[in-house]
Image (cartoon, rainbow, N blue to C red):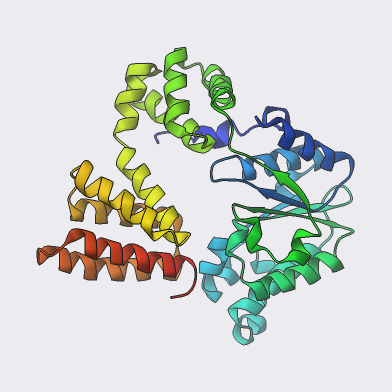
Amino acid sequence: MKGPLWTETYAPALDDVPQPQAREHLRGAIEEPMNLLVHGPKGAGKTAGVRALAQEVHENPDADLIEINVADVFDMTKKEISNDPRFSPFIDSKRRRESSKADLINHVLKESASYTPMSGSYKTILLDNAEGMREDFQQALRRVMEQYYEATQFVIATRQPSQLIPPIRSRCFPVVMRAPTHEETVGALERIVEAEGVEYDDDGLEYVAGYADGDLRKAVLGAQTTHEQHGAVTMQNSYESLNEVEADDAVEKMLDAAEEGEFTDARSTLDDLLVDEGHSGSDVLDDILAVSRSRYSGERVARIHALAGEIDADLVEGTSDRIHLSHLLAEIGEIAAGRA
């Protein structure tokens, strides 16, 4: 993207959250602050909804909304955690030396919850992508929630609420952030392109919404891509722009399936790329690495690159692309789940 992302520039206010029931439940948390479990599919607007809530309830949301992406933090090294500006004030050199990474993360969580809000009577801690929390960390989180409930609101955002232990689920009011409907997605796109002053037609917005298939973030970025490439969001422009990124979308879907252990689905998408779309094994491998770099960090991405080097050598030897890439997907699934 050439300029600021529209997903950030036009982040919704609470009244702009497209799902009526989720909007109503988030509004209820203004009148009666409570811990929340916000769950729904990828791209439904979970994080955006929590940020919109924080804008309503905190005089200084930049200070009193603390966002911790669970997947990113667990990928960090001890040094990276200690040097992160969000966490470094809580970590002295002795603790850095003597603590395990898990103890360091637990300490950061406790210290984040314990300090006095900058404005108002409480602050909000958002734990995003919480399906990646290990059970021992969840047990530590439960104790922190019990200890600091008076001054800290916890919001846990996840695609898989079943991965959370019952004591945490029972301490949170559930907010279902379902995928927006086609009409809701079109409405959100219309609000953004009109605010941006972009030329568009109804068919163009309809096409982008259909392409996104319930992923609001994907829809907004698709409209921005079309505008930047062609200057207007029309049917023809959208078709030309978004077809160029379909392969990356397929790889995203394939990695989602691998992460969730759905290897039959992952291999089915791989077959589509290799057979139906005619991509070479090397091209698919390059796309897997590009997408992996955007979703993983630290040790995980390093291990995936090391595996990719082995797979690339196998591909050069001329044996089955499908077998070798299927093996890579299985390994990525294990790495993402923390089992390898």
Figure disc tally: 0
Q: Report if residue 90 is visible in the image.
A: no
Q: What residue is at 65 percent from the left and 56 percent from the top?
A: 161
Q: Quadrant of residue 204?
A: top left
Q: Quadrant of residue 138?
A: bottom right
Asked if residue 240 lies left or right of residue 43, the reply is left
Asked if residue 243 lies left or right of residue 117, the reply is left
Q: Quick one: 182 or 298, which is closer to the camera?
A: 182
* Percent x, y of residue 122: 85, 52
* Percent x, y of residue 232: 39, 17
Q: What residue is at 53 percent from the left and 35 percent from the top?
A: 216
* Percent x, y of residue 32: 89, 44
Query: Which residue is at the far bottom?
Result: 98
Q: Report if residue 1 is visible in the image.
A: yes
Asked if residue 305 lies left or right of residue 220, the reply is left
In what quadrant of the picture does the N terminus appear? top left
Q: What residue is at 32 percent from the left and 49 percent from the top?
A: 269
In what quadrant of the picture does the C terminus appear? bottom left
Seen in the picture, residue 257 relative to 301 is either above or below; the reply is above
Query: Which residue is at the far left?
Result: 318
Q: What residue is at 80 percent from the left and 71 percent from the top?
A: 143
* Percent x, y of residue 283: 21, 51
Q: Quick one: 70 or 180, which is closer to the camera?
A: 180
